[in-house]
Amino acid sequence: MSVFALATILFKVCVLANFCDSHPFDTIKVRLQTNAEFKGPLDCLLQTIRKEGVNGLYKGATPPLVGWMCMDSVMLGSLTQYRRLVNEYIVQPRRAAQPASVWAGREEEKAKLPVVGHGVAGVMAGWTVSFIAAPVEHIKARLQVQYSRSRNGRLYTGPIDCAGKIFRQHGIGGIWHGLGSTLLFRTFFFFWWGSYDLFTQAFQKHTTLSTPAINFWAGGLSAQIFWLTSYPSDVIKQRIMTDDLDKRKFPRWRDAATAVYRENGWRGYWRGFVPCFLRAFPANAVALVAFEGVMRTLNRSEIQ
């Protein structure tokens, strides 16, 4: 099998994992984040199926299925480049200025990017992909909170119709509505990629797991760390993205944050967390195995 064919297969696995990560779990999550009428995940699930059928769980599925092909490529590709740039232009010059005795016998360690560097590269990759993620997530969220079972009762009949109507009424700014909250949310990639490196080092040092197994466990656990730190900002982001564009209740990020607290107290920032937390481990673990597998394959091909 050629390198290109293998890389293509692994990339498709990564995309499929992200799609499973999105639906139907993400529909439940977004509805809980934006609608206080649901008592919990099970109530939301049952009401959705009863009123809208199983198809109701897959509203807004097309934007992420298509968009994540670009988002994953941009995020993981830029992450790799930012790691190299941070190490080459920030970390190594600082280490070179230190006395030689500091790194005596630790040349291999000296060449590696530290945990903080991985976190910084993660933030930069998160900001970069936000410009693609914002319109994808915006359209997805608006489709997910349409509760009518009949297409005639919905404002938007699909992602193209949604994007077209928003653009005609609110211009390009309307399509990218929520970009600021998306940038803030993805700033927490610092904890995802920083903890991913920490877990990887720990598994390499203290276990005999294979490299793909290490990628799996480090990827899944680091995703949990990411959601534990970022989830409140995701709740606020969804409120902003599903806000009425004609009569905005949340012109500022602070307005949405205040509204969430006023309605449900501090628990409001964690509505929908359970389905999100449960689905995050397997989907991201598989995605990281696929990504690291592609990178190892490409690196071997370059050496040969």
Image (spheres, grey):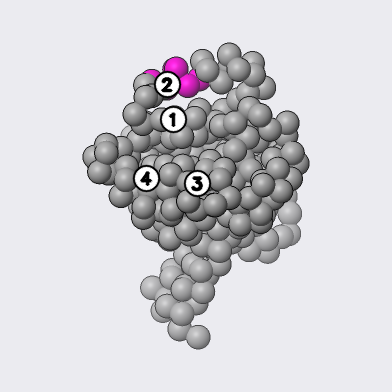
Cα distance in 3D space between marks 3 and 2: 23 Å
Q: Nearer the viewer, residue 294 or 206?
A: 294
Secondary structure category for the residue under label 3: helix
Q: Residue at the spot x=54%, y=52% of the render?
A: 150
Disc 4 residue type (three-letter): Pro
Marks 3/2 in contact by CB < 8 Å: the verdict is no
Disc 2 residue type (three-letter): Lys
Residue at which label 1 appears: 243
Q: Nearer the viewer, residue 106 or 240?
A: 240
Label located before the other in sequence (3 or 1):
3
Quadrant of res 121:
top left
Residue extent of the magenta highlight? 252-257
Label located before the other in sequence (2 or 4):
4
Cα distance in 3D space between marks 2 and 4: 20 Å
Marks 1/4 in contact by CB < 8 Å: the verdict is no
Cα distance in 3D space between marks 1 and 4: 14 Å
Q: Residue furthest bottom?
A: 1
Cα distance in 3D space between marks 1 and 2: 7 Å
The relative height of residue 51 versus residue 38 in the rendered view (above or below) is: below
The reply to whether residue 35 is in sight is: yes
Q: Which mark is residue 249?
A: 2
Q: Is residue 262 left or right of residue 78?
A: right
Disc 1 residue type (three-letter): Asp
Q: Which mark is residue 153?
A: 3
Using a 10 Å C-alpha cutoff, classify the residue at mark 3 as few (fewer than 14 neighbours), some (14 to 19) or many (20 or more): few
Q: Quadrant of the C terminus?
A: bottom left
Label located before the other in sequence (4 or 3):
4
Secondary structure category for the residue under label 1: loop
Residue 285: horizontal and vertical position, in percent? 63, 55
The relative height of residue 181 versus residue 252 in the rendered view (above or below) is: below
